[in-house]
Image (tube, helix red, strand yellow):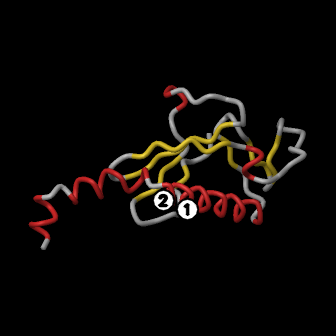
Amino acid sequence: MAAILASTGFLDISTNTYFTMGRTQSESIAGLYRLFDVMKGRNENWTNNWILMKGGLWMETEQTFCEWQDNWEVFVVHLFPGEVYMSFKLLPPGIDYKESYGDDGYFVRGSYTPYLNESY
């Protein structure tokens, strides 16, 4: 059976499209939101120099917290699907992604829990 699937290109298609599937991407974003909700509950700090969480609150500046604290109101998730992992970058709404910004973490195949880069 595996030989048949491999010869028909099924393995290539399934490997190359996993992270481009809408459900995979939406579940991954939901996993990212859950991670930040846990971090909020623990009063943690994190930044990528575009967005800042200080003491579990999303901040506009180092002294002023955002009026809205819902993750989707604070940042936009930019996803970059690959074969083995999918990286992501979090940016404030209205900021276009540039490759020079790099990424903030990644998801591995089969898990919707993100690996978040250490805070800058």
The picture places residue 116, in percent across and down from the top left corner, at: 55, 52
Label annotation for residue 24: 2
The picture places residue 103, in percent across and down from the top left corner, at: 52, 39
Local crowd size for mark 2, using a 10 Å CA cut-off: few (<14), some (14–19), many (≥20): some
Q: Is residue 89 left or right of residue 12?
A: right
Local crowd size for mark 1, using a 10 Å CA cut-off: few (<14), some (14–19), many (≥20): some
The answer to whether the residues at label 1 and label 2 have Cβ atoms under 8 Å apart is: yes
Residue nearest the viewer, comparing 4 with 31: 4
**Residue at position x 35%, y 52% in the image:** 17
Q: Is residue 109 left or right of residue 54?
A: left
Q: Which residue is mark 1?
A: 27
**Residue at position x 51%, y 55% in the image:** 25
Q: Amino acid at mark 1?
A: Glu
- Which residue of the protein is positioned furthest toward the front in this rendering? 8
- Which residue of the protein is positioned furthest toward the bottom in this rendering? 1
Above or below, 80 relative to 40: above
Secondary structure type for disc 1: helix
Above or below, 6 relative to 71: below
Q: Amino acid at mark 2?
A: Thr
The picture places residue 55, in percent across and down from the top left corner, at: 80, 54
- Quarter occupied by residue 92: top right
**Residue at position x 59%, y 62% in the image:** 31
